[in-house]
Amino acid sequence: MMSYPAIPHFVKAMGHRVVSYILNVTEAEGRLILMQKLGLSRIQRDTLNQYIELCRQLRVSAVDQGESEQSFFYRLPHVMQNGRHVFNVWRAQQGGELATRITTADPLTSAFCQLAGELYPLFLIKAGQRPHLFYRGAGYLTAAIEQFPISKLVQKRMAADPALSRLFTTTGKEPQQTCGDYKDATGHRGMVSLASLPVSILVNSYDLMRIRGVVSADRFVTTVQEMLDMARSLADGEVAHIPMFVGFRNAALTNLAELDTKWGSVRRYTPGIAEYVLQAAGLMAKRRNNGFMLESGYAFAINFGDFLEDDDWPEEVLDAEGEQQTTELNIILCMALCYLGQHKAFVAPEWVWRIDPFSLDNRRQDFSTVAETSDPVAIGDEDLVDIERWSMLVDDTDSSGIRLAMSRLYAAAKKPVTQDALMDVIIALRNIFAASEDIVPIKAALTHIVEQETDLAMIDQLAEDWRALLTGEFDDDPETIREKVYQCVQLCLTCLRHFYVHAPMLMTRPDRLSYLCEHDVTQSKVNP
């Protein structure tokens, strides 16, 4: 084994993945190489030296021409040898294989996936703390794509594709001049061209692969194929269910890597997923034991051409945002009911990321959410039966009559020391029992629901607090408010649990308060 060349800090900062790819070693070995803790063969040492020297030269050249040091990243795509990027040439010299060619009779898919395999190593460069934004920067991938002979074939076949060609309402001599505008149901507008469409499909495919967690050239190519199929469906005027990821805090999978649920696939944060998704070093370590991620679908469509200004969207697309919010609330409620009494904090969403084939915007959005707990729910194998049971109860029960309660409880959990939070939980309690006029009669109904030792004087206190809040006379301190809010949240969840288990048909009855005052539903069957 040969000794190490000196590795400059800026080369180390470009990350281990590109070194792993070039030298045809595992990612773990790539990390050790950058720390100079793994022996190298002669050919590996020579290749690493070439990589370091190339980066040095491009960096010096950028500075000499008055550019920023970081601008050398934009020069890397231009380093070609015999129609291949030098990173792929070096990998082949190490005995490494490139991405597997897709076997397909579809000429566009074949050419597109070949281009994806050629471009793959350029995504592995860690350009700054937020590389997912760098890839979207003007010129980086466009310049890279233009270097490959296969790119001309991709553009030619896109222009001839029965579906994708519909997007290009204007035809020009240059790829960027053959273009068209599109709009989605949220009002977001964009433009696609023969030059930009390959870029957007490749960038969003890389995002999708990284968020799912398995990173390889072959996985990238198959994800590109998935994204290309999605683009064709949308260009055909169909509704596509684009991938949507929602990150949750205050719970984590302990001895599970992945969990299939009614709502989609739930995954734990691996280091690779956390690095790409959370985009904040301080959160990466935390989310390993306090967070998980849900992958599901989001109904999506676009209008373009003669229908660009048409706002007559399919009902499924118009309902997509509401469906997302319903799913999030159902997960919050399911976890709250499954672990009732064990944890104070709600398991709640904190970000969402939707991925479509056309947008070059970063579609990740952060939520206003509940505070992070130091005692998260630990979801293990032993909990799967209960979680499945509660997910089915919550999803399959018509709870339209009490949905206000859940949204108000969640709103209160975000700001538990405020007067607004106390009003929210009282509204939630009244909604659960359909107590539109007075909260005090709820006491009679509660005798059939809660344990005998429960202090029902809380209801009288909440009634007084409600009046004081409305008249402006309420003056409790924040900590007192917090305690009242917590007690009322627990009472509401206890009641909701009772409804789901013993009286699901009552949830839609406007007379549920009077019925509960007269009947013990645990002992009798409720008539709808």
Image (cartoon, grey):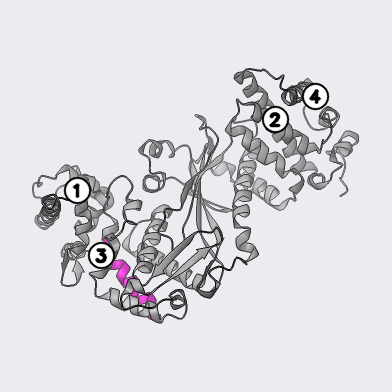
Q: Earlier in the sequence, mark 3 or mark 4?
A: 3
Q: Mark 3 points at which residue?
A: 143
- Asked whether the beta carbons under mark 3 and mark 4 sit within 8 Å of each other, the answer is no
- Region of the chain picked out in magenta, as a range: 103-121
Helix, strand or loop at mark 3:
helix
Q: Distance between the residues labelled 2 and 1?
A: 54 Å
Which of discs 2 and 1 lies nearer the camera? The answer is 1
In the displayed structure, does residue 23 sit left or right of residue 260?
Answer: left
Amino acid on which disc 1 is placed: Ser
Q: Looking at the image, is 59 positioned above or below residue 370?
A: below
Q: Earlier in the sequence, mark 2 or mark 1?
A: 1
Amino acid on which disc 4 is placed: Gln
Q: Mark 1 points at which residue?
A: 68
- Asked whether the beta carbons under mark 1 and mark 3 sit within 8 Å of each other, the answer is no
Q: Nearer the viewer, residue 282 or 250?
A: 282
Local crowd at mark 3 within 10 Å, few (<14), some, or many (≥20)? some
Helix, strand or loop at mark 1:
loop
Q: Position of residue 368 (x, y in %)?
A: 53, 39
Which of discs 1 and 3 lies nearer the camera? The answer is 1
Q: Mark 4 points at which residue?
A: 452
Helix, strand or loop at mark 4:
loop
- Asked whether the beta carbons under mark 4 and mark 1 sit within 8 Å of each other, the answer is no
- Give the prevailing secondary structure in the magenta stretch: helix
Amino acid on which disc 3 is placed: Ala
Which of discs 2 and 4 lies nearer the camera? The answer is 2
Q: Looking at the image, is 234 positioned above or below residue 41?
A: below
Q: Mark 2 points at which residue?
A: 423
Q: Which of marks 2 and 3 is nearer the N terminus?
A: 3
Q: Residue at (41%, 44%) from the top-left corner?
A: 278
Q: Look at the image and say whether residue 377 sits in the magenta stretch.
A: no
Q: Residue at (25%, 70%) from the top-left corner?
A: 146
